[in-house]
Image: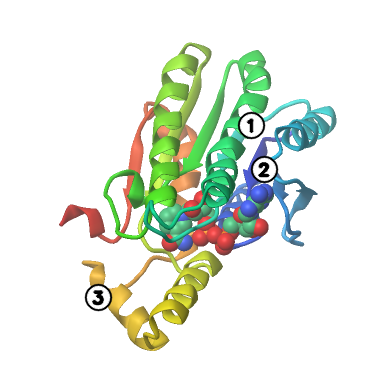
Amino acid sequence: MGRVCIVTGGSSGIGRSVVEVFIEDGYRVFNLDITATDACETIRCDMTRVAEVERAIAGILATTGRIDVLVANAGIHFSATIEDTAEADFDRVFATNVKGAYAAIRTVLPAMKAQHGGAIVLTASDQALVGKSNSFIYNLSKSAIASMARTTALDYAQYGIRANAVCPGTIDTPLYHKAIDAYCARSGAEEAAVHAEEAQLQPLGRIGRPEEVAALIHFLASDKASFITGSLQVIDGGYTAR
Ligand code: NAI
């Protein structure tokens, strides 16, 4: 049996690029997502429902007998101050971004322990490292993801399991475009001007591409990163260096 990789949120954006890079490297890739893609085997699964995640991963294990890599990437964005974040918004963002990652990691660990090895990569955000305005619950959720990478790394190093998080800055994905559209609808700002401003905010003068983040995730999951665990890897065109 070849190497097996599970990606959550692999139907779009960063996750979709992750699926492609692992397929290219010869992995059998399974995608857990609420929407389908034809890029790989997708199991329809809502990450906010722990039992669904457990069922999906049990099904994968029954087929493959092993899991080498988990990329816990599914996430949603929500822009608001703490005052404007209703309880339902808090629960929805935390359930998707944090509970979803918890469910996936917790479910793959027994198999990785039995194999005496495995690599977990979580998609955090530059917002695990810096505050941004109007981003109360998203920022909090990404800080929690960073914490999950550290604590998982410490608890499972003894089993040869590594856990790291990537911290992407602004990346050109459907999530980014939805966030800009919502901002323009709220503020009346002109879309092209906002995209240009976003590019100028980054020291490299442009926003990132999903395949650039996928390349870092692929590296972190590989044996080339065999001494890297519990780390937060920034990939943000220099944004947080300011
Ligand atoms: P995207 O919206 O293009 O893709 C997210 C994927 O997650 C979609 O396929 C969606 O169907 C899936 N998903 C959402 N809720 C789900 C649920 N409950 N169950 C299963 N699947 C679900 O977004 P993008 O930009 O590719 O984001 C991927 C990750 O990267 C997210 O965790 C996001 O927070 C993070 N990120 C994105 C940045 C950006 O600028 N695009 C910057 C930093 C982090």
Q: Outermost residue, left direction?
A: 242
Quadrant position of ligand 1: bottom right
Among the two numbered marks 1 and 2 on one chain, the one whose residue lies closer to the N terminus: 2
Task: Classify mark 2 as within 8 Å of ligand 1 or not, answering yes or no.
Answer: yes
The residue beneath circle 2 is 47
Residue under label 3, please give it.
Answer: 200
Amino acid tagged 1: Ala
**Sequence-wise, which precedes: disc 3 or disc 2?**
2
Q: Secondary structure at mark 2?
A: loop
- Image quarter of residue 198: bottom left
* Position of 213 relative to 117 (above/below): below
Residue 235 image position (x, y, % from top left): 34, 53
- Looking at the rendered structure, the kind of residue marked 2 is Met
Nearest the viewer among 240 and 115 is 240
Q: Position of residue 84 (x, y in %)?
A: 43, 58
Q: Secondary structure at mark 3?
A: helix
Three-letter amino acid code of the residue under disc 3: Gln
Identify the residue shown where x is 30% and y is 75%. Answer: 199
- The residue under the point 75% across, 46% down is 45
User: In the depicted view, which residue is nearer to us: 178 or 68?
Assistant: 178
Q: Earlier in the sequence, mark 3 or mark 1?
A: 1
Q: Which type of secondary structure does the marked residue at label 1 adopt?
A: helix
Mark nearest the camera among 3 and 2 is: 2
Pointer 1 and pointer 2: residues touching (CB < 8 Å)?
yes
Please name which of the two marks, 3 or 1, marks the residue nearer to the observer.
1
Give the total number of marks visible in the rendering. Answer: 3
Mark 1, residue position: 103
Q: Residue at x 38, y 51 (%)?
A: 82
- Residue at 49% over, 40% down: 122
